[in-house]
Amino acid sequence: MRSSTAPARLAGRGLREVSPLARAVVVGTARRFLDARGFDLAASLAYSALLTLVPLVACVTLLTSAFFGESGTGLYRLLRFLPGAGRDFVTSLQAFGAKATSVSGTATLFFLLTSLRTFFQVEGTVQALWGSTLTPRRPLRRLGMALSVMILGPIALGVLTSILLESGAPLGDFRPFGSLLSFGLLVYLYRKLPGSYVRWVPATIAAFFVSAALTLLRIGFARGVAHLTDLNQTYGPLSAIVIFVVAIGMMTTLFLGGVSFAHAIQFRDEFLDHDTPAERTEEGGPLYVAVRLLLVLAMAWRNDRATRTIAALAGEIGRREEELAPLIAALLGEGLLTSDSGGNVALARAPETISLYAVARAIGESAPRAVPAGHDAAATTLHRVFAKANREERAVLQGTSLRDLLSGPDAQGDPDAIGLAVNR
């Protein structure tokens, strides 16, 4: 018979797990975002979005005017609910859209292709943040989703908004509608764009917080821009564009942060139990030892290109000669070291031309993950995953040379400090 206190114990344990779970999600979100260079991705995405906003608006204006006449002008009312999209900026876009109705078919095709390209850039950025390596969906399905998000969706919303405004609905009634619309769109994008399977709960939670943050951002810009009188004096007519650029940058950062947040929620058990950072230890593996002795030789190269005996190297890095002998033999065999008749060793070339990957390859520490040889769906997917992991690990090691480690803040001539810098 079950004890009556069992539910209470389970509830207590659940409450105790809330705090570490929340911390794991927050840390996992930040780590995922920073590891993928989320701020750089957001900045590049904001820049491309700004350049393609005008073609997108022109494309929607052309298609709306062709099929619905003047009924699609409500799109510009919806743009007013974007953070930073003030009246002057939207008015300028609307004036451009009115002129765009007279452009040629070639320009229309250019507008369409540019708008679709924006969607694929967003898709690629989200997949980079999520780390997806799966086979992308079918081309026709991707094209249909791009058309729905970038072209057909704005046209439908513009026409619907115009119809509601013509029926006498006040513009203020669209504010909750705009927040609800952004929430629904974010849920859809967080589910579909990563290319991997994303559960409804993580996508919904991330979309809720991001849409709320976007609403607060819009309110903040609406109230704060009025006080930026110095900005108008400095930039003049361009001040509206400057404000919109800043807002787009913040929006893309929040949007991509939501991708990392959804990822951390979906894999929360992994972040809670298996993704804690490893503690530093005094001992290191073969790669650590090899890099430490090479850094001593790199300092000698930089100073006077003097050679070192194995005994001197062992004493400087605190290792036994028997431990260094096989590593030095491997480095000599790969041409990273040279030796004279007396057994003294030195670098074979400049430190800035020796990467950590070359060191790892020389001592047998660069063996890639085994890639499956089968041709079934699982083997094909694992082949892509393992190959990408191998490429990224190789790229990180190839991007750091011995000279880079000598330039670190801890590398001021102290071999022990240098060794610690390598182990970070």
Image (tube, rainbow, N blue to C red):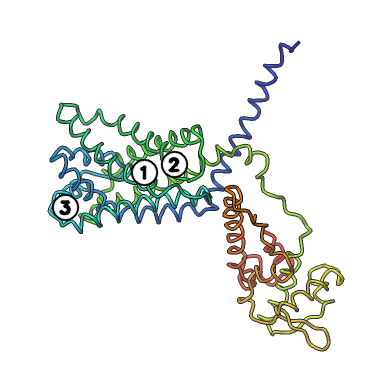
Query: Where does the image place residue 225, in percent across and percent down from the top left?
Result: 28, 44
Instruction: Please say if 209 is above or below 31.
Output: above
90 or 366: nearer the viewer: 366
How far separated are the C-alphas under marks 2 and 3? 32 Å
In front of the other: label 1 or label 3?
A: 1
Determine whether label 1 and label 2 are within 8 Å by CB. yes
In the picture, residue 297 is in which quadrant? bottom right
User: Where the C terminus falls, by quadrant?
Assistant: bottom right
- Residue 145 got which mark? 1
Q: Residues within 10 Å of mark 2 (few under 14, many from 20)?
A: some
**Left or right of 399, for residue 105:** left
User: Where the N terminus falls, by quadrant?
Assistant: top right
**Left or right of 378, for residue 59:** left
Q: Residue at x 60, y 68 (%)?
A: 398
Dot placed on the residue nearer the N-terminal end, 1 or 2: 1
Q: Residue at x 46, y 33 (%)?
A: 204
- Residue 100 got which mark? 3
Query: Where does the image place residue 66, in percent across and percent down from the top left?
Result: 15, 45
Provide the residue designation for mark 2: 192
176 or 63: nearer the viewer: 63
**Left or right of 388, for residue 365:** right
The three-letter code of the residue at mark 1 reads Met
Q: Residue at x 35, y 56 (%)?
A: 47
Query: Where does the image place residue 216, in percent across and percent down from the top left?
Result: 37, 36
